[in-house]
Image: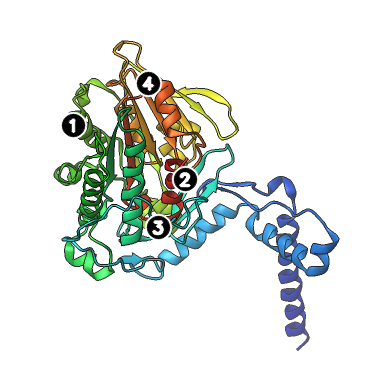
Amino acid sequence: MKSQKFFSWVKVILFSAVLVAVCVWGFILPLRPTESEEEKRTLTEFPDFTLASFLSGEYTEQISLWYSDTFPAREKLLRMNDLVRSLYGIGGESISSGNQVGEVIDTGETFVWETDPPEEPGSEHGSTDTETETVKLPDGDVGEIMDQYYVVGDRGYELYSFSRDMSLRYARLVTTTAQRLDGKAQVYVMVVPLSYCFGLTEDVQEKIGVSDGEEAIDFMYRAIESYGQQAGITSPPITVNICDTMRAHYDEYIYFRTDHHWTAKGAYYASRVLLDTVGRPYPALEEYDMYEIHEFRGSLYTHTRSEAMYRNPDTIVAYASRVVDHVTITTVEGEVLECPLVDPDAETLFGSSQRYRCFVNGDYPYYMTHNEELHDGSSILIMKESYGNAFIPMLADSYEYVYAVDYRFWRGNIQTFVEEQGVDTVLFLNNLVATGSEYTVGWMERLANR
């Protein structure tokens, strides 16, 4: 009896000692992380004390959040949790709970251009919606996190739900921009289809309630073409359809498995469709220097924490121009920097989840490349989100100047910029999700309406 009581006390003491040790370990400040590489965000900071927050209980709640969010070895513990979860059973397919069934696409709809349409919500202030969230990274870069995804084995797919209103808003802002630049610059628009458009069968797409991406792009293009004619624009916007090209090359690894972006090869094929359309020359793929950047686990992995994706990371194959080797960028803080156009050292410079930054160093308000071997005054302005990062290097050999702005962060005026720089070509480059997001379309509208 005494021995049983003794061992009971031993267990209580050992358990208490472990709890105290873990608690003390958790409060050792030098061990606490401040950034999450995999989640691409700054972790919760220790709150400042105020009497009001203390009395309301908010102060203690923030301390609790800080303690759990910055616990030492946090990401290793999360990895252990992922491994344990992977033992629950064989992972087949997974659908995000954030997925919403899109509206029916009217393939025969006619479009009417309104001279003075009612003000759209979000045209003054881009507002974050449930599909897209921006996360400030520790170095000032900004990454995108998307909610809708579908996972099969070691491959993830970002999904898209069609919204008629958002699609028409996107068509209108492109047309409005072309109207204001009429006689100054020709506007082109390229909507990039997502990987699921070609990687998932129609049956699977119907099963998971995802919209037909190619039909959605066709809807927007027909609206843009119709609006351009009705608006009386001398040079209406020109749509660049890359769906057939991307479908034809889908087996060539033109989209990542663990990330929502296209690969450099995907951007290459798309850029050639644009350059053929505008009549600009370009080098063959074998004329680029090729670099491999290994162990890339992108946004789809950080969302799903899929063990299959972790075990089978992507390899980034990057193509670097032999003529243009750097890009001039302007940060959110206004600092002007020169960075490699394509950085072959990204594997050592950036963590696994950030290696897409090998292209133009990531997301910034403004970019410029200068091809010193060309003297024809050719230039293009790209209105882009992060899909444009892999696209910019594909145009650097074809234009004397390539300008690009990320409309989420740039606060300039399109018309003024075009006039001052003498730009004669403007490209709206957006992936399908960006055309249906209140956040991204809202910021584009704000720039178009300035």
Residue in view at x 59 percent, y 41 percent: 138
Q: Residue furthest bottom?
A: 1
Q: Amino acid at mark 1?
A: Thr
Does the rendering let one see residue 344? no
Residue at mark 1: 277
Q: For mark 3, give the secondary structure.
A: helix
Relative to 249, is 271 on the left or the right?
right
Disc 2 crowd rating (10 Å Cα; few below 14, some 14-19, many 20+) is many
Gap between marks 1 and 2, in whole Å?
Answer: 28 Å
Q: Earlier along the polypeptide chain: callout 3 or callout 4?
A: 3
Residue at mark 3: 307
Q: Nearer the viewer, residue 208 or 353?
A: 208
Q: Is residue 150 above or below residue 352?
A: below
Which of label 3 and label 2 is nearer to you? 2
Q: Earlier along the polypeptide chain: callout 3 or callout 2?
A: 3
| Dot label at residue 422 | 4
Residue in view at x 40 percent, y 32 percent: 359
Gap between marks 3 and 4, in whole Å?
Answer: 50 Å
Disc 4 crowd rating (10 Å Cα; few below 14, some 14-19, many 20+) is some
- Is the C-beta separation of discs 1 and 2 under 8 Å? no
Does the rendering let one see residue 126? yes
- Is the C-beta separation of discs 3 and 2 under 8 Å? no
Q: For mark 2, give the secondary structure.
A: helix
Q: Amino acid at mark 3?
A: Glu
Residue in view at x 41 percent, y 70 percent: 88
* Count of residue discs: 4
Q: Amino acid at mark 4?
A: Gly
Q: Earlier along the polypeptide chain: callout 1 or callout 4?
A: 1
